[in-house]
Image (spheres, rainbow, N blue to C red):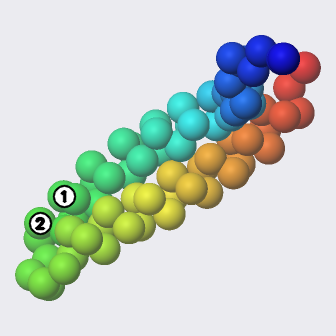
Amino acid sequence: MTNDSEPKARWTKDQAGATFVAATAFLFVSGPLQDAANQLNWEYVHVAAALVSLAVAFLAYRVGLRAMRKLP
């Protein structure tokens, strides 16, 4: 019988660094977008600002992951 107590999924330094970049990008972008959204009178402008922030975070994750993989 084998012992499979070791977790199957692990965070690598690449994934951790890219996640940090994505979270930072989300926080930096969401503030100005929310301020701009407060000046508009559209119905779902805050939802749109959140979706744009998530899209920026996703792109930052992909770029950060690519950059982290090139590091030694």
Marks 1/2 in contact by CB < 8 Å: the verdict is: yes
Q: Quarter holding the C terminus?
A: top right
Which picture quadrant has residue 16? Answer: top right
Foreground: 56 or 16?
A: 16
Q: Could you tell me how far apart the alpha carbons at marks 1 and 2 are, in whole angstroms? A: 5 Å
Please provide percent x and percent y for residue 65.
73, 41
- Helix or strand or loop: what does disc 1 sit on? helix
In the image, is residue 54 above or below residue 11? below
Query: Residue beneath label 2, please?
Result: 38
Foreground: 36 or 72?
A: 72
Query: Residue beneath label 1, please?
Result: 35
x 12%, y 66%: residue: 38
x 57%, y 56%: residue: 58
In-image side of 9 versus 59 (left or right): right
In-image side of 42 versus 64 (left or right): left
Residue projecting furthest to the bottom:
42
In-image side of 42 versus 63 (left or right): left
x 32%, y 63%: residue: 50
- Is residue 30 visible to the viewer in this orientation of the structure? yes
Q: Quarter holding the N terminus?
A: top right
Number of marks drawn: 2
Please provide percent x and percent y for residue 56.
51, 58
Name the residue type under label 2: Asn
Badge 2, how many Cα within 10 Å: few under 14, some, many 20+? Answer: few
Please provide percent x and percent y for residue 44.
19, 79
In-image side of 35 versus 25 (left or right): left
